[in-house]
Image (tube, helix red, strand yellow):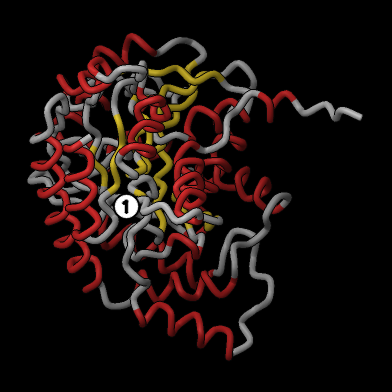
């Protein structure tokens, strides 16, 4: 018997980044020397004091259900973090703790969007944004950018994308996959296109906040335009900053009514995130922050090597990143000169087979002809990978 699958499941595709990682692991299991540059997670271990907090929670018997929206202690730590690092004041009833920042964004879209609503998404975008919108019955409206404008939208582009159905704008800065960061001036321009559209909620995805070396420093659109505070949702988490991807703790701050709706949705789906991971997250936010500075220096060194290495390959054009651990080179010229390769997906397959290097095709991020390379791996792997790519 053939089972009929729900339309909502049929309308979306599996995560391409996970697919590339899985394919690389599959080939590696056959004995191939595959260098995987697809995964978006730091290669460092979680700092010891954070792991110790989790172990202590286990020994102290803190292994039961918590409130669906997170431990009160963790929500207070998040409120303190927002106030200390971002100058944003949130009460605990404005904060939701979820199973990763991805879950936080999913909850937002489920709590906010109705069928027919439009979600404005600058491209290149993180792969999950459009499909999350579709799962909520909404329509993704993509604004395309490229190397010529450093992958950043303009006020004019945003104004042209707004309709009477626009309900949500996604901003991710520093950006996955491009690594670029909006300046204060650029955010102010975007904000000026939004002030006369109170029906539009703004989601600022700040998950790479601490992995940033650009001269502009970190600011989100709420810092730049406090007038947007009442209709902005600030998403963050501990995964990237503290190398805690597997712990699955994300969080957000936003309007009380919207957070309340998200809490109801979470209570009927996952309920609370892991109690043990929540205690670890408290230690991450309240504890020693030395790890962030040390890891940032290493990521910057890797970035500089990869940036120079990619631009030294014929047919590859890459801009310098402001942060994250990604480079996003334009490889259309490589595609054009390789026999049997017609697009970035086929290029990814070609490089995996011929160079034994796994990259993620740019079309997964809404940018055909580009490839995303993650330098969240050791320098030996990066040196070998760049050498293999150059030879191929």
Judge left or right: residue 139 versus residue 383. Answer: right
Q: Where residue 72 sits: x, y (%)? A: 54, 69
Q: Quadrant of the N terminus?
A: top right
Q: For the point 30% across and 21% down, which residue is it?
A: 369
Q: Quadrant of residue 203?
A: top left
Q: Position of residue 344 (x, y in %)?
A: 35, 24
* Residue closest to the eye, 241 or 370: 370
Image side of residue 3 versus residue 105, left or right = right
Q: Nearer the viewer, residue 249 or 338?
A: 338
Q: Secondary structure at mark 1?
A: loop
Q: Nearer the viewer, residue 124 or 316?
A: 316
Circle 1 crowding by C-alpha within 10 Å: few under 14, some 14–19, many from 20: some
Seen from the viewer's position, the closer of residues 151 and 356 is 356
Q: Quadrant of residue 283?
A: bottom left
- Residue 246 shows in the view: yes
User: Relative to residue 121, is residue 69 depicted above or below?
Assistant: below
Residue at left 16%, top 28%? 316
> Above or below — where is 246 with respect to 316?
below
Residue drawn at (22%, 23%) of the image: 334
Quadrant in the picture for the C terminus: top left
Residue at 68% over, 48% down: 264
Q: Is residue 125 visible?
A: no
Please say if 64 is above or below 218. below
- Disc 1: which residue: 88
How many labels were placed on the picture?
Answer: 1
Query: In the rendered view, does 355 fall on the left or right side of 16?
Result: left
């Amino acid at each position: 018997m053939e089972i009929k699958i729900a339309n909502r499941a049929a309308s979306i595709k599996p995560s391409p980044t996970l697919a590339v990682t899985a394919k690389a692991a599959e080939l590696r299991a056959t004995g191939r020397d595959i260098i995987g540059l697809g995964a978006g997670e730091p290669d460092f271990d979680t700092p010891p004091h954070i792991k110790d907090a989790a172990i202590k929670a286990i020994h102290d018997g803190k292994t039961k259900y918590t409130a669906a929206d997170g431990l009160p202690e963790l929500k207070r730590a998040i409120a303190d973090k927002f106030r200390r690092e971002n100058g944003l004041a949130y009460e605990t009833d404005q904060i939701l703790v979820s199973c990763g920042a991805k879950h936080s964004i999913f909850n937002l879209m489920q709590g906010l969007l109705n069928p027919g609503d439009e979600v404005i998404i600058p491209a290149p975008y993180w792969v999950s944004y459009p499909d999350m919108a579709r799962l909520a019955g909404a329509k993704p409206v993509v604004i395309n950018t490229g190397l010529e404008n450093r992958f950043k939208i303009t006020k004019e582009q945003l104004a042209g994308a707004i309709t009477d159905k626009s309900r949500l704008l996604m901003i991710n800065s520093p950006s996955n996959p491009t690594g670029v960061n909006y300046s204060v001036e650029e955010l102010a321009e975007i904000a000026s296109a939004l002030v006369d559209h109170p029906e539009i909620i703004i989601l600022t995805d700040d998950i790479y906040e601490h992995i940033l070396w650009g001269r502009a420093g970190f600011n989100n659109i709420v810092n730049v335009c406090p007038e947007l505070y009442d209709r902005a949702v600030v998403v963050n988490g501990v995964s990237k900053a503290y190398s805690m991807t597997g712990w699955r703790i994300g969080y957000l701050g936003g309007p009380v009514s919207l957070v309340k709706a998200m809490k109801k949705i979470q209570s009927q789906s996952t309920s609370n995130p892991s109690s043990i991971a929540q205690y670890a997250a408290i230690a991450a936010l309240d504890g020693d922050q030395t790890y962030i500075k040390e890891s940032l220096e290493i990521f910057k060194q890797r970035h500089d090597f990869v940036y120079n290495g990619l631009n030294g390959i014929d047919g590859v054009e890459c801009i310098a990143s402001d942060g994250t651990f990604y480079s996003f080179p334009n490889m259309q010229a490589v595609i054009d000169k390789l026999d049997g390769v017609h697009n970035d997906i086929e290029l990814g397959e070609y490089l995996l087979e011929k160079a034994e290097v796994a990259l993620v095709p740019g079309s997964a991020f809404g940018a055909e002809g580009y490839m995303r390379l993650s330098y969240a791996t050791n320098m030996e792997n990066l040196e070998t990978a760049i050498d293999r790519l150059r030879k191929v």
